[in-house]
Amino acid sequence: MNCKGIIRELTDYLDGELPLAIKAELEQHLIGCDDCRIVVDSTRKTIEIFCRCEPVPLPEDVRSRLHSVLRRHLGKATN
């Protein structure tokens, strides 16, 4: 497992959905790679903080602009 592999498998790792062999390989990489360990720990902490927060309602003008951009983007994707 290399650093790119960590990024590719990060979501499944944090969700506990990696096959045991890949999980072991990923964790072995984390032992020797401070950068990847920081990415994994930071991502895990961010998710934990986000899950404990109450949703903040979007102001109506932001919501309208967001929906407009999404409609334009989705329209391009289907053409």
Image (cartoon, helix red, strand yellow):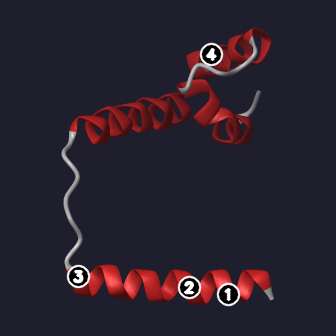
Q: Residue at x 23, y 35 (%)?
A: 52
> What residue is shown with label 3?
60
What amino acid is found at the position of numbered circle 4 in the picture? Glu
Q: Earlier in the sequence, mark 1 or mark 3?
A: 3
Give the crowd class for mark 1: few <14, some 14-19, many >=20 residues within 10 Å.
few
Q: Earlier in the sequence, mark 3 or mark 4?
A: 4
Residue 73 position by quadrant: bottom right
What amino acid is found at the position of numbered circle 1 in the picture? Gly
> What residue is shown with label 1?
75
Q: Residue at x 68, y 21 (%)?
A: 26
Q: Does the CB distance between marks 2 and 1 fall below 8 Å?
A: yes
Left or right of residue 13: residue 2? right
> What residue is shown with label 2?
71
Closer to the eye: label 3 or 4: 3
Q: Residue at x 41, y 31 (%)?
A: 44
Mark 4 to mark 1 CA distance (whole Å): 42 Å
Q: Residue at x 74, y 81 (%)?
A: 77
Left or right of residue 62: residue 23? right
Q: Does the CB distance between marks 4 and 2 fall below 8 Å?
A: no
Q: Nearer the viewer, residue 2 or 41?
A: 41
Q: Earlier in the sequence, mark 4 or mark 1?
A: 4
| Element class at badge 1 | helix
| Mark seen at residue 27 | 4
| Element class at badge 2 | helix
Q: Nearer the viewer, residue 36 or 9?
A: 9
Residue 39 at what x, y percent from top left? 48, 38
What amino acid is found at the position of numbered circle 3 in the picture? Glu
| Element class at badge 4 | helix
What amino acid is found at the position of numbered circle 2 in the picture? Arg
Closer to the eye: label 4 or 2: 2
